[in-house]
Image: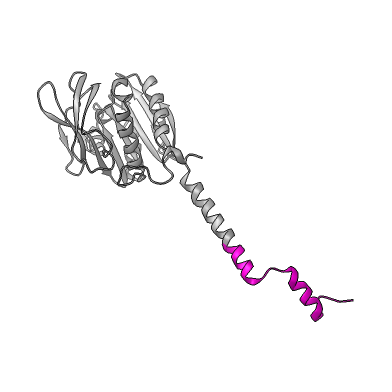
């Protein structure tokens, strides 16, 4: 009887075993497959975004769900809507989210709420400030800190109506696809009292009322956090336009460092990448 220890047995065993080169090739193929699977999975992971809507003067019950739905159609993202400022009392209100969109118009809130937002963004959480958020909390003792976070001071706005928006930086990835001259069918033009020299100005509009020019879109850095801001978006007249939704989507991607220089989402962050 032939055993495996016998020379003849060893020869027979070799017939059933793959060669060293075959094993190496198989190991390499498995490693590449695992790496590819990991990369595709990571690239297709949606951004998790928190949208906070609160305050008066605006129909947030309509605006917030509309923005949630439409942003998730333009970006590989899931957008959770929370109404009111109560969640800001928790210093960890933004944990588990990649970015926070603030669409608020409260005249005041607690110092602790403002501190929690400041701390979260300062630590590096991307932020998007929409419309009235720029001059929210104006009755708060910490309003100056909020204005510093936003990178601009604005207290009042023109009467509601149409006005034309022009680019200040045509090369910006955020505004690359935005029209050179675009007229909103209706909005509130917030008056720029002052803007931080470090804020990067993107869009401007001339007041039809007095001819003065105001910045309506810009970016800024607050601590480690990237902040995208626009004073546009009072109601559905502007918010429902594809131009505005595209601007907001690009601003969100930019704040998360997921916008390429050509104005396209980074790989894995367009809606087509959704698994």
Q: Identify the image's colour scheme: rainbow, by chain, secondary structure or one colour.
A: one colour
Residue 35 seen in the current view: yes
Q: Residue 245: percent from the left, percent from the top?
A: 33, 30
**Position of 66 compared to 233: left or right?**
right
Q: Residue at x 41, y 31 (%)?
A: 87
Q: Residue 128: percent from the left, percent from the top?
A: 32, 35
Residue 85 seen in the current view: no
Would you identify the image quadrant in which residue 69 lies?
top left
Would you identify the image quadrant in which residue 114 lies?
top left
Q: Quadrant of the N terminus?
A: bottom right
Above/below status of 91 relative to 156:
below
Above/below status of 250 relative to 9:
above
Q: How many marks?
A: 0
Would you identify the image quadrant in which residue 154 lies?
top left
Residue farthest right in this picture = 1
**Position of 16 compared to 131: left or right?**
right
Q: Residue at x 17, y 28 (%)?
A: 191
Q: Nearer the viewer, residue 131 or 257?
A: 257
**Position of 57 compared to 190: left or right?**
right
**Position of 99 compared to 12: left or right?**
left
> Does the magenta-highlighted stretch encompass residue 182?
no
Q: Residue 123: percent from the left, percent from the top?
A: 35, 46
Q: Nearer the viewer, residue 249 or 177?
A: 177
Range of magenta residues: 1-28
> Does the magenta-highlighted stretch encompass residue 21?
yes
Q: Nearer the viewer, residue 233 or 270?
A: 270
Q: Residue 132: percent from the left, percent from the top?
A: 27, 26
Q: Mostly what secondary structure, the magenta segment?
A: helix
Q: Residue at x 49, y 51 (%)?
A: 39
């Amino acid at each position: 009887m032939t055993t495996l220890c016998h020379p003849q047995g060893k020869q027979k065993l070799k017939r059933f075993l793959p060669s060293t080169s075959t094993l190496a090739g198989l190991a390499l193929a498995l490693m590449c497959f695992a790496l590819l699977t990991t990369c595709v999975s990571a690239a297709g992971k949606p951004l998790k975004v928190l949208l906070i809507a609160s305050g008066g003067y605006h129909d947030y019950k309509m605006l917030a769900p509309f923005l949630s739905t439409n942003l998730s159609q333009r970006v590989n993202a899931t957008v959770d809507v929370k109404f009111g400022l109560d969640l800001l009392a928790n210093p960890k209100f933004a944990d588990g989210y990649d970015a926070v969109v603030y669409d608020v118009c409260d005249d005041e809130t607690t110092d602790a709420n403002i501190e929690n937002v400041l701390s979260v963004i300062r630590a590096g959480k991307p932020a998007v400030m929409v419309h009235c958020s720029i001059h929210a909390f104006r009755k708060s003792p910490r309003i100056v800190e909020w204005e510093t976070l936003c990178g601009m001071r604005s207290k009042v706005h023109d009467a509601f109506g149409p006005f034309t928006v022009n680019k200040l930086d045509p090369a910006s990835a955020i505004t690359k696809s935005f029209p050179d001259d675009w007229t909103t069918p209706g909005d509130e033009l917030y008056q720029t009292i002052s803007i931080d020299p470090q804020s990067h100005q993107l869009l401007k509009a001339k007041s039809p009322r007095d001819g003065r020019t105001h910045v309506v879109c810009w970016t800024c850095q607050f601590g480690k956090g990237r902040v995208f801001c626009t004073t546009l978006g009072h109601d559905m007249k502007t918010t429902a336009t594809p131009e505005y939704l595209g601007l907001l989507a690009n601003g969100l991607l930019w704040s998360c460092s997921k916008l390429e220089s050509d104005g396209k989402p980074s790989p894995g962050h367009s809606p087509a990448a959704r698994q």
